[in-house]
Amino acid sequence: MNLPLPIVGKAATEAQSAHELLARYTVPNYGRLALAPERGEGVWLWDAGGRQYLDFGGGVAVTSLGHCPPVITRALAAQAGKLIHCSNWYEIRGQGELGKFLTETVMESPGKTLFCNSGAEANEALIKLARKFGHATPLPDGTPRTGILTFFNSFHGRTYAGISATGQEKVKTGFAPLVPGFTHLPYNDFAAVEKAVAEAPDTVAILVEPVQGEGGVHVATADFLRGLARICREKNILLLFDDVQSGIGRCGHWCGWKTAAPEIIPDGVSWAKGIGGGFPIGAAWIRQRPIQPGPDAPDLCDILGPGTHGTTYGGSPLACAVASAVLTEIHEKGLCGHAAAIGAEITDTVQGWDHPLVREVRGAGLLLGFVLNPDALPVPAAAGEAATLPSIRVVKALMAEGLLSVAAGPEVIRWLPPLNVTREETATALGILRRVLDRLAAPAATVPA
Ligand SMILES: Cc1ncc(COP(=O)(O)O)c(C=O)c1O
């Protein structure tokens, strides 16, 4: 139904709730929870009514240093007073400095970075890199190699290439025709990859999350990653890691795969989310290595030459200043190691509860998934509640007690607190989690719809 859109004055607008304004004036593409955040500090968030929440959702792995940390607000203010934006027609020094840090400290391997604004865009850059590479290194008959392997339950963003790469039907429904050339395989199944590569000689790249976040917090095994690295090396296929959610300290190391297989140097990596700590920035790192054997072969990191790709906002002076401040803070405060330690403590604690509602704890560092046992959840009290996913029901129950978390699929609750979360804050969150799980597991329990 088309409602007339009354033009209202300032006073009338202020009287409307966030819920009313969103419902009337924004596209309903998000299933939002009934919480209108107004202010944040560290791991804490306050709603419009002044109610306080412990934010262990972290904006889905974005607020790596918590809400409004002084290092970010200082960097923002200082750079905003100097230069917010200038075109990529000019030499933006901040991009060079940030690229140097990513190559020398994060990757510890020669390479170059392309800056953009989001995770989807960073993956788009890697996918375009793969296609360009496949044209430059064709099959013996001259046909470009274009096939890209990705995995079931993956998530690579909402652009057309992103949803085409993503191994979940729900993001594709109603959007066909998609970008061709993607094949999805079972995650952590190297035999399936070997078979797919043998059957499709035009395979040019493998795009994989070191830890699948949106798909339910699944961690890649060392054997799987090493197998991928080996077959990519043997067949001159690009190994591309989507580290948008799992990277920049989130999993206890700069890079999400380093817990499992630290020696692997991929051909490309995408980052976003935590690298800006809340300010939009994405990055696609590309390895420096010849595209094929031979004296005149260009380096992979140079094949996206002038005019091949770009974006107006990508790597603005402001975005680079913020990201540099975030990376410096993570580096100087040793937050990768801190995230690894706190994550291990949370895992041990929750596993130690042996709780009937929790089947398993998965993840690495501070990308953690509590796999629910839906059979142990109380029968929904109200009609209509049954349609709500178990994970969402528990997320709502936790929110009602002042703890924010994020669903990852139908049966997994995800925690992604800031990398600098304290032991005290963690103990508070664990206390709420335990209390809510106990209440839900009690015979007469009810859960919010
Ligand atoms: C692994 C992964 N890749 C890509 C994306 C897309 O990032 P963005 O939402 O910044 O476009 C996400 C977002 O959740 C993600 O988790």
Image (cartoon, rainbow, N blue to C red):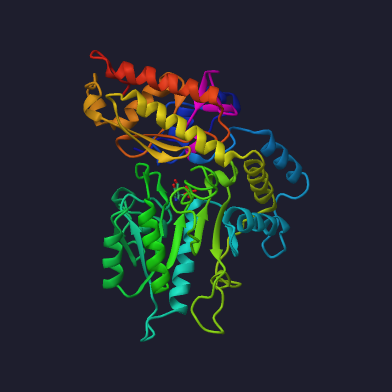
As rendered, which of 410 and 369 lies closer to the eye? 369
The spot of residue 194 in percent (x, y) is 29, 66
The spot of residue 2 in percent (x, y) is 37, 38
Q: Is residue 84 left or right of residue 301?
A: right
Outermost residue to the bottom: 141
Outermost residue to the top: 444
Range shown magenta:
37-60
- Residue 192, picture quadrant: bottom left
The spot of residue 120 in percent (x, y) is 47, 54
- The quadrant of the image that shows the C terminus is top left
As rendered, which of 337 and 251 lies closer to the eye? 337
Instruction: Assess whether residue 220 is covered by the magenta stretch.
Output: no
Res 40 visible:
yes
Instruction: Assess whether residue 40 is covered by the magenta stretch.
Output: yes
As rendered, which of 144 and 222 lies closer to the eye? 222
| As drawn, 291 above or below 7 | below
Q: Is residue 410 left or right of residue 235?
A: left
As rendered, which of 326 and 423 lies closer to the eye? 423
| As drawn, 14 above or below 101 | above
